[in-house]
């Protein structure tokens, strides 16, 4: 077995109604004034209003920032950091999906590390040296897993690309995981963010950096999502399915933080940069195409994925069983009504974008741990297949 390091330092507080009792967590970390960061969509939900009522009733000193933007751009994050510094808050509560949590991670980091977030992105000139302001994350999607990861994904609109700041200091101190915050999540967001979590688990599971601990998290995540994602979408108030999805997304993220990702995220991040394809939709669309390419890299693990997703693999050759995993994922995305063609996206990804997407993909750091070596022509082939 090869050497590895496994790390998951974020404290996870799980339970219905936990988002209404935040004061003890703030007190534990000595936070006297907190900024609550979210986006406009989430700010109008009942779950968020209840959370704020909870802060009021617990007499928490807080300021609100509801201007987080989906797929946060560099300029917006830099401006948000200035507002954080002016507010005098000494900690942040991020309420939302990956976009609000990633915005908050970057704000907390920039509050104690000089410069623009641009300088800290992959390939940039600065590295994080000082501990960020303390961050408490309250996820409202069961998807990105950003509540336990070390990454903040930021959009560079000048260069049409999404890049990450990755440093273990960015991991939130605490994730308060309250399934009641997920009840109002619209069906397509439930489906697409859940498919993002599944993608994390599958990419981490077959990654060249996978190891026994990350495998354990990935396997459990795949199984839980297979059993619960349809219920969470079509029966949104089913609190057990919501809870299972919320935990599954954390397990998938734990696997991803430690074992890495692969070509799905590489291509989808590049697609997000140029066409603003929502992260979960892009991943879901690309996942079966990339799995087809990756099966020869690790047929045993793909066969296990098929089994974890409920396929009957008895009596099949390993290769046939492995290919069933692709079918199972296609079936899932079809059931969830997620498009499987680039032409069917709200903002279609068109062939004139392919060169930029391929360039972005080839520059993706984690492409190196994809189970088969990815060449430019492989990415073109995937995009062409997905453009049917
Ligand atoms: N940091 C990481 O480790 C990591 C991992 C994966 C993805 N990401 C990034 O996270 C972002 C995507 O995050 P996401 O998929 O969680 O979605 P998101 O945060 O972008 O939210 C998508 C939309 O859903 C709405 N929404 C979210 N929760 C809701 C709820 N409970 N009720 C009603 N509306 C709700 C939001 O208002 C928003 O309009 C992308 O930028 C992606 O690149 C980061
Ligand atoms: Fe993701």
Image: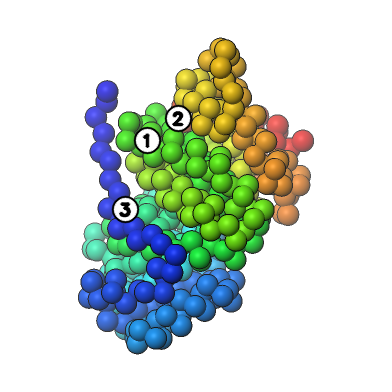
Categorize mark 2 by other alpha carbons within 10 Å: few (<14), some (14-19), many (20+). Answer: many
The answer, for residue 379, to whether it is visible in the render is no
- Mark 1 nearby-residue class (10 Å; few <14, some 14–19, many ≥20): some
Some atom of ligand 1 lies within 8 Å of the CB belonging to the residue at label 1? no
Judged left or right of residue 173, residue 46 is right
Please state the total of marks drawn on the protein image.
3
Residue at position x 52%, y 79% in the image: 49
Q: Which residue is depicted at the point 23% across and 63% down? A: 130
**Foreground disc of the pair 2, 3:** 2
Query: For numbered disc 3, what is the local secondary structure?
Result: loop
Residue designated by label 2: 206
Marks 1/2: CA distance? 12 Å
The mark found on residue 233 in the picture is: none
Residue position for label 1: 216
Image quarter (top left, top right, bottom left or bottom right) of the C terminus: top right
Give me the residue at 50% from left, 46% from top: 197
Residue at the (50%, 38%) spot, across then down: 223
Relative to the observer, which residue lies in front, 233 or 299? Answer: 233
Question: CA gap, disc 2 to disc 3?
Answer: 23 Å
Residue 102 vertical placement versus 337 (above, below): below
Q: Can you identify the residue that label 3 sits on?
A: 167
Task: Classify residue 276 by image quadrant.
Answer: bottom right
Q: Is residue 371 above or below residue 243?
A: above
């Amino acid at each position: 077995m090869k050497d590895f390091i496994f790390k998951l330092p974020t404290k996870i507080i799980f339970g219905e109604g936990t988002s209404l009792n935040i004061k003890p967590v703030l007190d534990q970390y000595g936070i006297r004034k907190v900024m609550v960061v979210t986006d406009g969509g989430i700010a109008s939900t009942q779950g968020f209003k209840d959370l704020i009522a909870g802060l009021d009733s617990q007499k928490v000193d807080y300021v609100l920032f509801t201007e987080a933007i989906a797929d946060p751009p560099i300029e917006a994050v830099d401006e948000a950091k200035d507002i954080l510094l002016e507010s005098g808050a000494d900690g942040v509560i991020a309420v939302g999906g990956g976009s609000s949590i990633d915005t908050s991670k970057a704000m907390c980091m920039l509050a104690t590390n000089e410069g623009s977030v641009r300088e800290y992105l992959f390939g940039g000139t600065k590295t994080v040296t000082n501990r960020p302001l303390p961050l408490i994350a309250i996820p409202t999607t069961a998807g990105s897993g950003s509540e336990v990861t070390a990454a903040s994904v930021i959009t560079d609109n000048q260069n049409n690309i999404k890049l990450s700041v990755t440093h273990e200091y960015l991991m939130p101190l605490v994730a308060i995981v309250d399934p009641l915050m997920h009840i109002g999540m619209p069906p397509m967001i439930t489906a697409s963010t859940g498919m993002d979590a599944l993608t994390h688990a599958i990419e981490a599971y077959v990654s060249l950096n996978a190891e026994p601990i990350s495998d354990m998290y990935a396997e459990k995540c795949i199984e839980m999502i297979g059993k619960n994602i349809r219920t969470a979408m079509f029966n949104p108030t089913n609190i057990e399915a919501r809870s299972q999805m919320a935990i599954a997304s954390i397990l998938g993220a734990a696997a991803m933080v430690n074992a890495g990702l692969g070509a799905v995220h590489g291509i989808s991040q590049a697609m997000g940069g140029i066409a603003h394809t929502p992260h979960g939709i892009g991943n879901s669309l690309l996942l079966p195409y990339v799995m087809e390419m990756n099966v020869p890299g690790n047929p045993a693990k793909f066969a296990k994925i098929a089994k974890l997703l409920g396929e009957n693999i008895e009596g099949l050759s390993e290769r046939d069983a492995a290919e069933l995993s692709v079918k199972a994922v296609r079936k899932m995305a079809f059931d969830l009504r997620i498009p499987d063609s680039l032409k069917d996206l709200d903002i279609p990804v068109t062939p004139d974008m392919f060169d930029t997407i391929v360039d972005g993909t080839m520059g993706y750091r984690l492409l190196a741990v994809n189970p088969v070596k990815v060449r430019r022509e492989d990415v073109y082939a995937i995009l062409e297949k997905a453009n049917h």
